[in-house]
Amino acid sequence: MGLSRYIVEIIEQHRATICSGVPFLHLLENFRNHHILTDTEYTQLEKCDRHQKAGHEFLKILETRLDKDFFSFCEILIANTVESIQKIGRTLKEEATKAQVMIQDFAAMNDVRHLISNLITKTVPLSSSEIVLEPELVVAPNNEHDFMSIPKIITKKYYKDIVNTVPFPNILLSLREEEILDDDQYQNLREYQNQDNLKFHCMQIIKAQPNDKFFKFLEILKESRIENVRNLGAYLETEARNKYQLQ
């Protein structure tokens, strides 16, 4: 079944911090005892020579688990004696809990909206020309930075266009050279066998970039040998600069 998408996004946003700040090789026994890892997975991860390598491999496994296993992972970190590890665990748990509550609130709100809509429809029949579609619910930004985050806005609006057009396996090296990917992210993404997972994780990383790095990503697209990739890069750059009044 795998983790909920919002939890996967939280992990991706903090992947570098998790992999560099958690001594995974020292915690494998805890993960196995809490049934996050199987005996076979435990043995495989024991063979990793670095905590970061083990971290990337562990997170791949964690994404195939249930949400409750993610929260067990958070609790293990929170129970650690090292304050910096506790902080990572608390941050992950708090962000996931807030997102969970927000999703539940919006689900409840949508239930009420649909109930009201159905009642109105049954009471006052409408002709097809009078029907008004309900606007999509938009989650309010958490802070001022979110208003200015061009990568988040553009990748959300043109998500399908990007994932269906951009040959992510072919541009990983360029993303690394432009420091959009760090070394660990680059190596980790190269090992993905499932193209859908690769595209999803690339999009999560790009979405979390500052504006200047996002425009470097668009430059990579504009320099592609594939015409529709070049066209997409140019269009997205124009869209971003015009819509958000950037020079």
Image: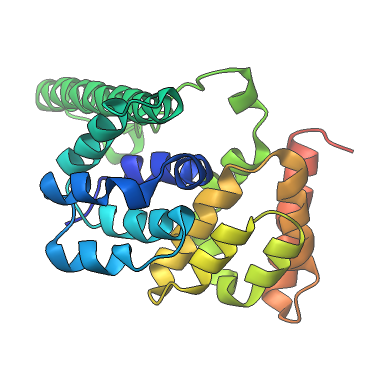
Q: 208 and 151: which one is in front?
A: 208
Q: Would residue 199 appear left or right of 121 to someone viewing this image?
A: right
**Quadrant location, the C terminus:** top right
Residue at (24% x, 48% y) in the render: 3
Q: Quadrant of residue 221?
A: bottom right
Residue lying farthest to the bottom in this orientation: 225
Q: Quadrant of residue 9?
A: top left
Q: How is the image coloured?
A: rainbow
Question: Is residue 234 visible to us here?
Answer: no
Q: 184 and 51: which one is in front?
A: 51
Where residue 147 sits in the image (x, y, percent)? 62, 25
Work out whether 231 lies above or below 123.
Answer: below
**Quadrant location, the N terminus:** bottom left
Q: Would residue 111 appear left or right of 11 to someone viewing this image?
A: left
Residue at (72% x, 68% y) in the render: 174
Residue at (40% x, 68% y) in the render: 196
